[in-house]
Image (cartoon, rainbow, N blue to C red):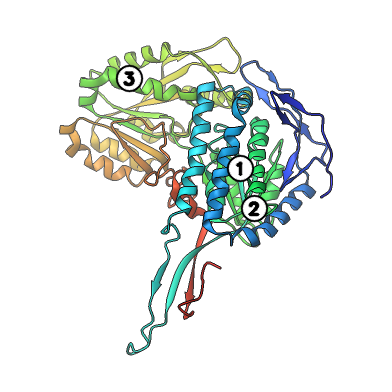
Amino acid sequence: MFGLRTFANSEIGMVKISGENCIGNQRSAMGNVQFRTFNPVSNKENDWIFCEATVEEINEAAVLSSQAFKFYRNTPPAERANFLDTIADEMEALGNDLLIVFCTESGLSESRARAERARTIFQLRSFAGLLRGNDWKRTSIDVAEPNRTPSPKTRLTKTLIPLGPVVVFGASNFPFAYSTAGGDTASALAAGCTVIVKSHPMHAGTGELVGSAIIKAAIKTGMPNGVFSNLNSKGIEVGVHLVKHPMIKAVGFTGSIQGGRALFDLANQRAEPIPVFAEMGSVNPVVISPLSLIRKAEFWAGRYADSMTQSAGQFCTNPGIIFVPESSELDLFSQLLTEKLEVIENQSMLHPSIFATYSKKKEEVLTEKSVELISEKRSEKENYMGHVLARTSGAQFLENTNLHKEVFGVFSLMVTYKDEVELTKIIEQMEGQLTGTIIVEPEEMPTFNSVIEVLKYRVGRIIFNGVPTGVEVCPSMHHGGPYPASTDARFTAVGTDAIYRWLRPISFQNFPDDFDIES
């Protein structure tokens, strides 16, 4: 290993943050490009200094990951399960210091930090539990029929094997659950793939601490050096080099359409194209029926005010488009929703750059001639936001696809529809989404069956009389959807089925009955 040296450490409690890259079990800081993370609440940079990975360090990590994969892919599932459980233990052992760094780098609340850490730990333990079962590899056997006519049938066994070294991109809005030890990493390690994390520059300190927990767990459980690496980056260069590296065999990404599509294109331009499993943009359309407005306007206004403002609207499942019927109750619902939004405290966004993007995209929608601003709550604090609620007609929404774009933050566009025919036409025109929601009263269900039928082919998950925010981690969850919600609608980024992104089928023909296909 080259470039190893000791940095002056900044400390929170007993936890040290070095700012170095972790290449397997070694720390390295060869480069001259340095950066700091940012505290959006105090509106200033944090003290820790991070060193961006160099091309040499990227190559070192990729080579080590490839070497480790040759051993790790053959570790018994029970041993990998123990590894994942030990990662969860080590994350818990970091205690409150980890939560403090999380909040300092994200501006998110302590309660959010605790909830997201609990979710991440649950994900790790869920994959450990999956590995201890017997059916996750979906092995099938066709016995030989040597006497079959007109031609004999040979014995066939089909199972799943891991793809190889995986690059995981940390997500800006989920420093735990979709980042260093999040669902992509947990599912890839469960599958038998080695992992290199391209840490997100907005929470590099959080990433380093979680990365240290993974490496400690790897050493404790006897996993090969290189099963996990964590690389810092200030810009896009590290990610580009990783995706283009010939030893990398798959990519996991959660973020913007622009970022995910760029990685997808890079991966497909390689001499050996590789899969990119990207979870990207979504406006998560919500359909409210006429009777729901009449009977439960205040109830749904309250539920949706809470859903819109969770974590300053920085969820991929934030309800960005709300379809409401043209009716006498429409103005009352708009008023109730505005009142509920007004009393919710303003929140900081994750970073000034995210706030700037939100402000730009918000203005782009509001300046469209067909859009009416219903209400807007501003804040005098930098990077803080309240809400924006706007309205347009279904006809204008059909005509102007600029209104279909995601505005990442507390922004929702109410779109009025005349009837189910117009609503169906609108949904058919929309791009792929992560979720779609139907809010109807029981006696209206027959009328809305056609809407649900169309929605099935535009989204990955349909919610009935609920809110899209909140993604349960369980086998029946599907978190993905038609492009551009994700790059492959067949796979989920949440739940134990996420493991199947990192596995491929292989058949063994005419092998002896006692041949061990697991070896």
Nearest to the observer: residue 416 or residue 408: 408
Identify residue type, mark 3: Ala
What whole-number distance in Å separates the C-alpha atoms at marks 2 and 3? Answer: 51 Å
Q: Is residue 368 left or right of residue 201?
A: left
Q: Residue at x 75, y 52 (%)?
A: 59
Above or below residue 488? Residue 179 is above
Q: Residue at x 32, y 14 (%)?
A: 336
Q: Is residue 39 left or right of residue 254?
A: right
Circle 3 Cα neighbour tier, 10 Å, few/some/many (<14 / 14–19 / ≥20): many
Query: Given this view, does label 1 or label 2 mark the residue nearer the observer?
Result: 2
Please provide percent x and percent y for residue 179. 58, 38
What whole-number distance in Å separates the C-alpha atoms at marks 1 and 2? Answer: 22 Å
Identify residue type, mark 2: Met
Q: Nearer the N terminus, badge 1 or badge 2?
A: 1
- Residue 425 falls in image quadrant: top left
Quarter of the C terminus within the rendering: bottom right
Asked if disc 1 and disc 2 are in contact, CB closer than 8 Å, the reply is no
Identify residue type, mark 1: Phe
Q: Residue at x 35, y 37 (%)?
A: 436
Circle 1 Cα neighbour tier, 10 Å, few/some/many (<14 / 14–19 / ≥20): many
- Residue located beneath label 2 in the image: 223
- Residue located beneath label 3 in the image: 301
Q: Is residue 167 left or right of residue 405?
A: right
Above or below residue 140? Residue 336 is above
Please provide percent x and percent y for residue 339. 37, 11
Q: Which mark is residue 169?
A: 1
